[in-house]
Amino acid sequence: MSLTQPFRHALPVSESLFHAALYLTHVGWERVRSGEPYPQNDAPFFYFKWQEGRTLPEFCLALCVAGGGQFETREHRGPIRAGDTFLFKPGEWHRHRPAPGSGWTLMWIHFNGDEPLRWLRDGAFQLRQVFPIIENPPLFRAQFEHLLTCVHRDPAANSSNYSRMAIGLLAHFLRDAPEGTVRGNPEVQDEAVKRAVEYIWNFSHDIVDVPAVVRQVGVPRRTLDRRFKAATGRSILQEIQFCRVSRAARLLQETVMPVKHVVHRAGFRSDEHLRLAFQAAFGRSPQAYRRQR
């Protein structure tokens, strides 16, 4: 790990981030040695008394890298061991501390937003008590370390990239979509089409057009167009539009983000382009679509 000294960063949350699906508020990496007092009192926001515990207005996700300790909530209590990840939810009374004989090294983030709150409401988090069920712990830890490293380099920025990295961490313990969920594409077997679809759904929030997709995949345009239509039932251009409309629809349904922000988050160039796309897809304006959710 490239981090060598403990740190805590309270991140600035701009108005644009405050309305994002997920945003970070605090991050940290702490090392508490055997016998040292805890919580460490050099950061008032994070200080609490074990006898009283604490309640946060946001999520706290932490990974115990070394050592161990214990946690308590109103419903559960138990040990924290090296390698354990734990999650405390907004409004959940809790307390945690390292074991006096071992101390611990801990990485953590605090976050909030409409999207994780919806996942919580819908039961999408896979948890055993407060412990997320993670199938690939080494990858999870590597992503956690990468996020903290990036934030530590420039904590004043609190860029939307940090939010995307945090969503990647949560994806490790979100349930798969239930059977019967409407999917954007049937299962695609053609590898070139798979790469094209992945590129579109990863980058169509930005300026992406058909030539950009063709360059990314490395297949002649006419050939790719033909194979794409055969595999998905849509042209490449239609897939780009479908992706943007789908993303905008989800943002309108699942967040309170203003429509003017949805325009750019979904990859449309203007309010008018979004309006025309919704009129064609749903027969109504984005505002009317939101009212009828």
Image: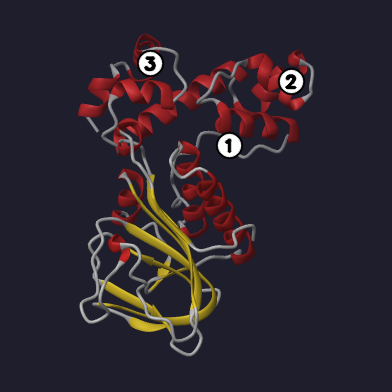
User: Amino acid under label 1?
Assistant: Pro
**Callout 1: few (<14), some (14-19), or many (20+) C-alpha neighbours within 10 Å?**
few
At label 2, counting other C-alpha atoms closer than 10 Å, the crowd grade (few under 14, some 14-19, many 20 or more) is few
Residue visible at 27% across and 25% down?
289
Residue 248 percent across, percent down from the top left: 39, 27
Residue found 24% across the figure and 56% down from its top: 57
Residue neighbourhood size for the residue with mark 3, other residues' Cα within 10 Å, grouped as few (<14), some (14–19), many (≥20): many
Visible residue check, residue 89: no
- The answer to which image quadrant residue 252 occupies is top left
> Of marks 2 and 3, which one's residue comes earlier in the chain?
2
Marks 3 & 1, CB-CB < 8 Å contact: no
Residue assigned mark 1: 186
- Front disc: 2 or 1: 2
Residue 25 relative to residue 51: left or right: right
Pointers 2 and 1 in contact (C-beta within 8 Å): no
- Residue 274, numbered label: 3
User: Quadrant of residue 113 in the image?
Assistant: top left
In this view, 24 is above or below 71: above
Coloration mode: secondary structure
Tag 1 secondary structure: loop
The quarter of the picture where residue 231 lies is: top right
Residue 215, labelled with which disc?
2
Chain-order first, disc 2 or disc 1: 1
For image coordinates 40% across by 15% down, the residue present is 277
Coordinates of residue 4 in the picture (x, y in percent): 60, 62
